[in-house]
Amino acid sequence: MRNRAGTMVSLLIVAIVVFGTILAMIELNPFWVAMGIWATLTAFLPVILTHNIRNILPWWLLALVASPFILSLIGYFFNYHISRLTFAGSWIAEIGCIFMVSLVTMLIIRAYSQVRMNQTFTISSAFLLYMGVLGIYGILDFYGDILFGTDNVPSNADYMIFLTASTIGGVVLSMLFSYYLRTISFEEFQATMVGKGVRI
Amino acid sequence: MRRPQFLITAFFSLIILGMLFISLSEGDSYAYSTELISLIILWIPPFLAWRQIIDLPWPAILFMGITLFLHSLGLVTLWYYSTFWWDKLTHFATGILVASLVAMGLLIILKYSKTIRIPNKWLAFFVFVAVLASEVFWEVFEFAMDSAVGTNMQHSLVDTINDILSNVVTGIIAGVGAAYFIRHDSLDSFIRGLNVERTVKRLRSRLIKENDIPKS
């Protein structure tokens, strides 16, 4: 169980994510709405499964997941919301957020279900989930453009350049995380998921 | 390779060979080069079985034959251009085939790994994720080929999105199918039929590190 301060910081980060999700709804941006809902769910899933608010995800992990939302909130007050970021800026924010939420999802599955995975398989599965989400992202944006009259995916070349760059980005992130997890014990990292046990 | 697998391969080879001659006589370079590649793909499973790498089950080879046949037929009859749903049909069929192969790969990992265990209720999710990811890899590959070699594998944004969407559906079918199969049949007897023991041993000695066994 986490201490009171840790829980409060985690809750504050979730509040930022929820605020960012509402802003994304107002701006008709289906991607950030979906990411916001997913990030919030991953944060609260351990709480729901264990019926204990103090089992919320650790604040540092949540901060990584929520970094685009936190940066966005800071930027919002300086009239520099995430939707106005440069292409490179928003791309880094997008792939970073997708990868982190994918990884956290896999860690939650590993911690709270009967699924058993070694470190390599966990990161590989997170990478596959990340790639799958990139595919669904395209579908969401495409139909979002048709429904809301936005222009998130202007052409096939634009989408494919994004997809190719994101694939390379995903490989780099997977390698970085593999390296990071080699420097600390994977079990130690997994231990941040408090209240472990088979619940889903 | 077992007799049914060989007969299926030979049967579809003859049909595609016939189409290859038609395309050659018409001088359609895209069609005959595709049919030639289809013939090569068709003989990959016999080659893998001969090299004792993997012995694919006959339904997988039958489906591969049907998929390649439909693709060649669409080129010879020009149905790809005249019938709007032909492209969707072939993509759906390819999706099912790829999904089955991905599911098979995952089942092999599950059977031989000491540190990976995926219960039945989670299998559908993992197969779905793997299928969807493989589709995205394929789209990136198509884009890379179009950019580097000048092929015309990707037609438009709508086509790309439809391809991914059809694989979302095939991923769900393959996931549910794999979970259903494992519930009703023996994983052991299925994997034994694939004859992958030797390949797994070879790969394990080279690649797989299983030193991080979870304690829980």
Image (tube, coloured by chain):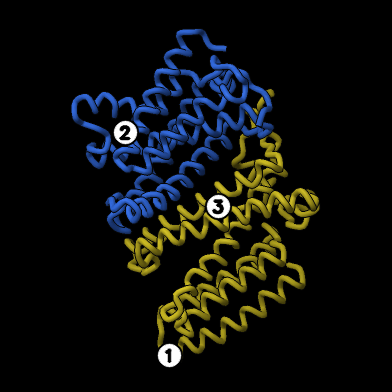
Chain colours: A blue, B yellow
Amino acid type shown at disc 2:
Leu
Q: Looking at this view, name the residue that lies furthest to the top.
A: A4
Residue positioned 67% across, 36% down in the render: B116
Q: Is A182 positioned to the left or the right of B107 in the image?
A: left
Residue positioned 31% across, 52% down in the render: A153
Q: Which residue is mark 1?
A: B26
Front: mark 1 or 3 = 3
Q: Which residue is mark 2?
A: A23
Q: Which residue is mark 3?
A: B131
Badge 1 element: helix
Marks 1 and 3, how far apart at CA? 37 Å
Residue B37 in the image: state x and y as whole percent. Answer: 50, 73
Front: mark 2 or 1 = 2
Badge 3 density bin: few <14, some 14–19, many ≥20, Cα 10 Å: many
* Depth order, front residue of B91/A23: A23
* Depth order, front residue of B207/B65: B65
Q: Say yes or no: labels 2 and 3 on the same chain.
A: no
